[in-house]
Amino acid sequence: MEREERTRPGTPAPPDPPRPRLTWQRLTVLPLALVVALLATLLWFRHTRLDPDAEDALARLRVSRVLWQHIELTALATLLVAAVTLPLGVLLTRGVLRRFTPAASTLAELGRTAPVLALPALPALRPGTDRTTVLTGLVVCAALPVLSSTVAGLVAQGPAFREAARDLGMSPLSRLTRVELPLAVPLILAGARTALVLNAGTATLAVLGGRRGLGALITTGATHRCVPALLLGSVLTAAVALLADWLASVAEALLRPRAATGI
């Protein structure tokens, strides 16, 4: 009633304040559900009798160590993806390389539909596989979503924004950092979120290249026919992927308003 009385006839009502992007449900429901699921799985695993061979193999692996190795491999691969694809996406929309933008976008989209999950397994075909080779497979596997999103975000703005920034006297670098990249942040974050979740899942295949991680826990359970170890490795892998997606969604919600006001 008070709002209607204050608004004069013929004057549009002021818009409602925007709803916050982050709610307490979004911040707490998924982490709490993951904690409950992990505690239930760990309690069940600890109270399950294992074969002596499987118990010895799991004792050598140490669940906490392979979990940390999996998280470290996922984070490092995602950082490398961002370090490689973001500059490449910017270069493909600049100067003489701009003519290759349509071809690069098409290749990236085709690559996203290809069986990329097999790429991290390729290092297993060669002897003496090291960590760099495994990381290369993960980076190639997850680079296409970020590259495609970066190019799409920079191309979708149209020439009007660049011309307006040029009329204001901005240098090319200033136009890129203050206009184009902030406007492209939502699409770039969406691609980075996809790459992070993809790395969290495909990092299990690093065990085929001689690297440990949660994939070692899964293969140990399959080799010794130990269902508890197989289930524990699968649950931990799913939990890492879901947690990575949750963290990326929170970062996306926090960074989008900054990108909108950074112009």
Image (cartoon, grey):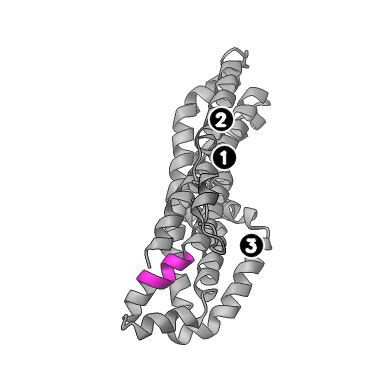
Three-letter amino acid code of the residue under disc 3: Arg
Q: What residue sits right under mark 2 in the picture?
A: 34
- The reply to whether dot 3 and dot 2 touch (C-beta < 8 Å) is no
Disc 3 is placed on an element classified as: helix
Q: Nearer the viewer, mark 3 or mark 2?
A: 2
Q: What residue sits right under mark 1 in the picture?
A: 242
Residue for point 49% across, 27% down: 63
Q: What secondary structure do most residues of the magenta stretch adopt?
A: helix
Three-letter amino acid code of the residue under disc 2: Leu
* Depth check, front residue: 186 or 22: 22
Three-letter amino acid code of the residue under disc 1: Leu
Give residue 145's quadrant in the image: bottom right
Q: CA distance from mark 2 to mark 1?
A: 8 Å
Q: Give the number of marks.
A: 3
Residue 58 location in percent, x, y? Answer: 53, 24
Q: Which residues are magenta?
A: 177-184
Q: What residue sits right under mark 3 in the picture?
A: 112
Residue count near mark 1 (Cα–Cα under 10 Å), binned few <14, some 14–19, many ≥20: some
* Depth check, front residue: 205 or 125: 205
Q: CA distance from mark 3 to mark 2?
A: 28 Å
* Depth check, front residue: 79 or 3: 3
Residue for point 56% across, 23% down: 36
Residue 217 location in percent, x, y? Answer: 56, 32
Give residue 162's quadrant in the image: bottom left
* Depth check, front residue: 246 or 22: 22
- The reply to whether dot 3 and dot 1 touch (C-beta < 8 Å) is no
Residue for point 46% across, 28% down: 64
Disc 2 is placed on an element classified as: helix
